[in-house]
Image: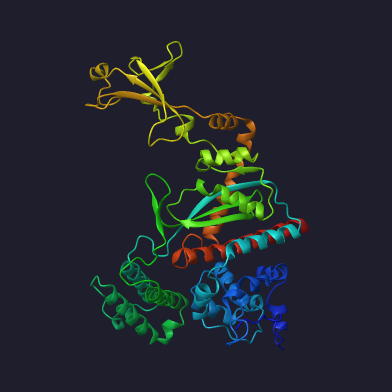
């Protein structure tokens, strides 16, 4: 049964918070700025309201998820830290002597209470509303990009992931006491996942018998992570399939790939996140520009300018921005603006003949204007060369494929839209504004290295979305606090 919590619990020890939690502590500042009561309205559909036992307060549970972003720990270690950390208890609005929930309730809260909610958009909207209330300017420019997040089990089969975690756990124990090795069970050498699970359980049980090892934080944290992995396999997999079925292979470049998710997002010039969209890793960046613009508008930004990289200069995006009078500071793909020519294989245009000439000086004898199948939507000019001349040319095999029955040179005809963007690209205003794109790279680094977005904490697209929602909320609130401090300085 859902029941709202009525403020901070009354306790004779409450004054400890005034002594131990500084006035400028980030958790105290967030509690002061944010009224979390909006969570009740969003989640009440996932609770019964008139019968059953009292459920754990949803605001309390959400705050634990936020604490996990600030302090990347397993659920068990997070709850253990909250048991004695006064700043955690103050943020959770409980008395210093109160107990903390069992960590298993956090997993249940994520799976059951947050399903079918729009938590990501809700938390972004809340932070932007707080920024507006505190007179922090949003401007009318957004910077867009996509950052990848590795799957929790990147490129590893279930047995490989479990074996790696067991190895990390053993090494943590060896650093404390090398002789402990003799008391551990024999390593599993088979490729059967159940055998590896049984070995990991036996290893954990062996360590649990040593009271001294359990007091070492490094050992305890790795043991808890191993235990969580076992639970994940039992709850989310059949032990023979991938442990993260929603994660997909994406490409950062022609030579590098990753296994995981993409977070497509927009920020203001001063670094506030105004839009966010989570997808599997293979999705294209530019496809989500329209959604990011609409999210940013919904959250209070009057978007008039968009800054992005080449991925966002697709024709659909150019058309939308042109239609809505939005200036798009994104360079055209070189295949559109410059074509596919290479310096060592460059054809040049003879303006008098109206034909292209090959590197050896042979002129095309025919040209055709056409929309080619399997090519982009722009029209092409196809120039045909005499293949008999190619057969006796020094560049045979380089410029002309040996045995080919024809030799053509294809030129993309830029649409008016592309030509307008190319002219804009060459302007001083474009170059000046484009220099601001580095700011979203800084935000990328902050989200990954400071708030743990480098790797997913949970399995599945839903788990990644919940992690992203918590990350965006914390990142925005800390940015708002810094902006408020600047104004007060």
Q: Identify the image quadrant of the N terminus.
A: bottom right
Point out the residue furthest to the top here.
Answer: 352
Residue 265, horizontal then vertical, whole percent:
56, 53
Q: Nearer the viewer, residue 82 or 150?
A: 150
Nearer the observer, 235 or 210 = 235
Q: Residue furthest right?
A: 488
Q: How is the image coloured?
A: rainbow
Quarter location, residue 55: bottom right
**Horizontal and vertical percent for residue 13?**
70, 86
Residue 106: x and y in percent read: 52, 77
Residue 483 visible in rendering:
yes
Query: Camera-side residue: 280 or 77?
Result: 280
Q: Is residue 420 above or below residue 27?
A: above
As displayed, is residue 443 above or below residue 4? Answer: above
Q: Quadrant of the C terminus?
A: bottom right
- Residue 313 in view, yes or no: no
At 58% from the left and 69% from the top, the residue drawn is 66
Q: Residue at x 37, y 67 (%)?
A: 243
In the displayed structure, does residue 47 sit left or right of residue 193? right
Q: Quadrant of residue 165?
A: bottom left
Q: How many numbered markers are drawn?
A: 0
Measuring from the top left, give residue 377's x and y in whole percent.
45, 35
* The quarter of the displayed image where residue 86 is located: bottom right
């Amino acid at each position: 049964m859902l029941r709202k919590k009525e403020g901070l619990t009354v306790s004779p020890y409450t004054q400890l918070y005034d002594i131990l939690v500084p006035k400028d502590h980030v958790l105290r500042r967030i509690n002061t700025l944010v009224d979390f009561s909006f969570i009740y309205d969003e989640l009440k559909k996932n609770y019964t309201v008139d019968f059953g036992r009292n459920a754990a307060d949803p605001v309390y549970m959400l705050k634990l998820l936020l604490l996990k972003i600030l302090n990347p720990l397993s659920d068990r270690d997070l709850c253990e830290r909250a048991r004695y950390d006064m700043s955690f208890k103050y943020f959770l609005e409980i008395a210093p002597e109160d107990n903390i929930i069992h960590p298993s309730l956090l997993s249940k809260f994520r799976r059951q209470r947050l399903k079918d909610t729009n938590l990501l958009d809700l938390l972004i909207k809340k932070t932007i509303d707080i920024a507006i209330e505190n007179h922090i300017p949003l401007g009318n420019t957004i910077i867009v990009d996509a950052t990848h997040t590795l799957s929790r089990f990147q490129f590893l089969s279930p047995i490989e992931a479990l074996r790696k975690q067991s190895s990390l756990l053993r090494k943590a124990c060896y650093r404390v006491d090398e002789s402990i090795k003799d008391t551990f069970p024999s390593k599993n050498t088979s490729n059967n996942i159940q055998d590896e699970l049984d070995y990991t359980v036996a290893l954990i049980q062996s360590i649990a018998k040593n009271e001294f090892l359990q007091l070492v934080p490094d050992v305890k944290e790795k043991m808890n992570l191993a235990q969580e992995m076992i639970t994940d396999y039992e709850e989310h997999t059949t032990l023979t399939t991938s442990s993260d079925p929603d994660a997909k292979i994406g490409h950062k470049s022609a030579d590098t790939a990753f296994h995981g998710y993409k977070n497509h997002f927009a920020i203001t010039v001063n670094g506030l996140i105004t839009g966010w969209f989570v997808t599997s890793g293979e999705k294209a960046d530019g496809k989500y520009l329209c959604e990011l613009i609409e999210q940013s508008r919904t959250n209070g930004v009057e978007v008039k300018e968009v800054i992005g990289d080449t991925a966002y200069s697709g024709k659909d995006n150019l058309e939308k921005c042109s239609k809505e009078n939005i200036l798009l500071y994104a360079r055209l793909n070189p295949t559109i603006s410059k074509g596919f020519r290479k310096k060592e294989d460059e054809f040049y245009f003879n303006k008098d003949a109206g034909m292209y000439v090959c590197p050896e000086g042979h002129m095309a004898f025919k040209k055709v204007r056409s929309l080619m199948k399997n090519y982009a939507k722009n029209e092409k000019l196809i120039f045909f060369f005499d293949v008999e001349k190619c057969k006796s040319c020094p560049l045979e095999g380089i410029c002309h494929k040996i045995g080919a029955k024809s030799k053509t040179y294809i030129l993309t005809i830029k649409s008016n839209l592309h030509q307008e963007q190319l002219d804009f690209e060459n302007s001083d205003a474009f170059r000046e504004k484009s220099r601001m794109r580095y700011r979203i790279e800084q935000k990328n680094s902050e989200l990954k290295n400071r708030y743990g977005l480098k790797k997913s904490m949970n399995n599945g697209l839903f788990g990644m979305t919940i992690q992203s929602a918590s990350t965006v909320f914390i990142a925005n609130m800390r940015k708002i606090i810094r902006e408020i401090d600047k104004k007060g300085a």
